[in-house]
Amino acid sequence: MIGVFDSGSGGLTVLEALVEALPDESFLYLGDHARAPYGERDNAEIVAYTTEAIDFLMRSGCRLVVIACNTAASVALRTIQQTWLPLHHPRNRVLGVLVPMVEALAGVPWHREVPHEDDILLFPRVVLFGTTKTIESRAYLEEVNKRAPGCDIVQQACPGLAGMIEDGASETELLDVVSKRVAAALEGHMGFVPDAAVLGCTHYPLVRHLFAYCLPEETRILSQPDLVADALSDYLRRRPEFSDAGQGGRTVRYLTTGDPAHLRGLAVFMQNLHGQFTRVRL
């Protein structure tokens, strides 16, 4: 069983892509809705909360966990992989959503930290939208620049947007915020027309159409859920010991630290749910 973790509901966009790409795998989703969003919290809290959630999923039978939260992946993943996981669950693995996107932007595999002269820059100009913490971490900026130093990345924080999506804000309210953040990113860099846009929060694909409306027509919005699904499919081909394929009927279960009744109000964003949320304590 594969665990999928997010601070709230945004990770459902990743889970949907995983369920479609891996029809024989079982999934256990955990949203830390009681403490969402993570984007404005301090780093110590993000690391502590993410570690608690991953530990819960692994004690629930998940040997592989995908952090479907850009904030948690940017701030906590490396610490968890390098210090916590070897001590507490040494046979298990934790992956994040950042690596597949970095590979797509740089056009090279993650293990290539030194650019080659013959590398082709697929997206010379990129605009990255994310939570305050994702932007402050500079994780995308640093990892892409290692591999593709010619890539010009403009970062734009979107404080409050993930929380508005969680709370079921109206499309008019969401469009107002998105339009202002897109304008801030582009107007602050005169003449900058991005080749690609990264919605660096798994909540943002839920309002992808609003970003598309506000961005230049020629800007390509990269799909993080699809990239993560492709990357996980490849990982399981290389590491079949973490796959459940062929071991019986698949299950998809949903857990939350919050109130399941509140989540029913997000039904417009959850049309592809395969079950109901169950409340748990971490």
Image: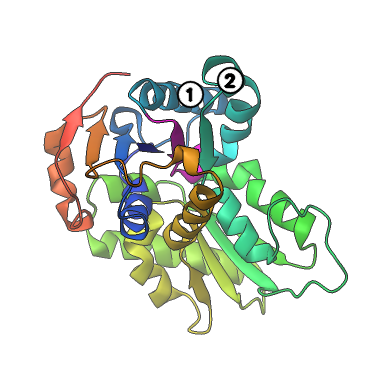
The amino acid on which the numbered mark 2 sits, given as a three-letter code, is Trp
Residue at image mark 1: 51
Q: Closer to the camera, 18 or 269?
A: 18
Magenta segment includes 68: yes
Of pointers 2 and 1, the one earlier in the residue sequence: 1
Q: Which mark is residue 84?
A: 2
Q: Residue at x 59, y 47 (%)?
A: 135
- In the image, is 140 to the left or to the right of 222? right
* Disc number placed over residue 25 in the picture, else none: none
Q: Is residue 138 visible?
A: yes
Report if residue 225 lies within the magenta region. Answer: no
Which residue occupies the foreground of this view, 241 or 23?
A: 241
Q: CA distance from mark 2 to mark 1?
A: 8 Å
Residue 156, horizontal then vertical, whole percent? 56, 57
Where residue 264 sits, quadrant-wise, is top left
Q: Secondary structure at mark 1?
A: helix
Q: Quadrant of the N terminus?
A: top left
Report the side of 227 relative to 163 (left or right): right
**Tag 2 near tag 1, CB within 8 Å:** yes
Q: Which residue range is magenta in the image?
A: 62-72
- Give the residue at x 79% y 52%: 113
Q: Residue furthest right?
A: 117
Q: Position of residue 183 (x, y in %)?
A: 51, 69
Q: Secondary structure at mark 2?
A: helix
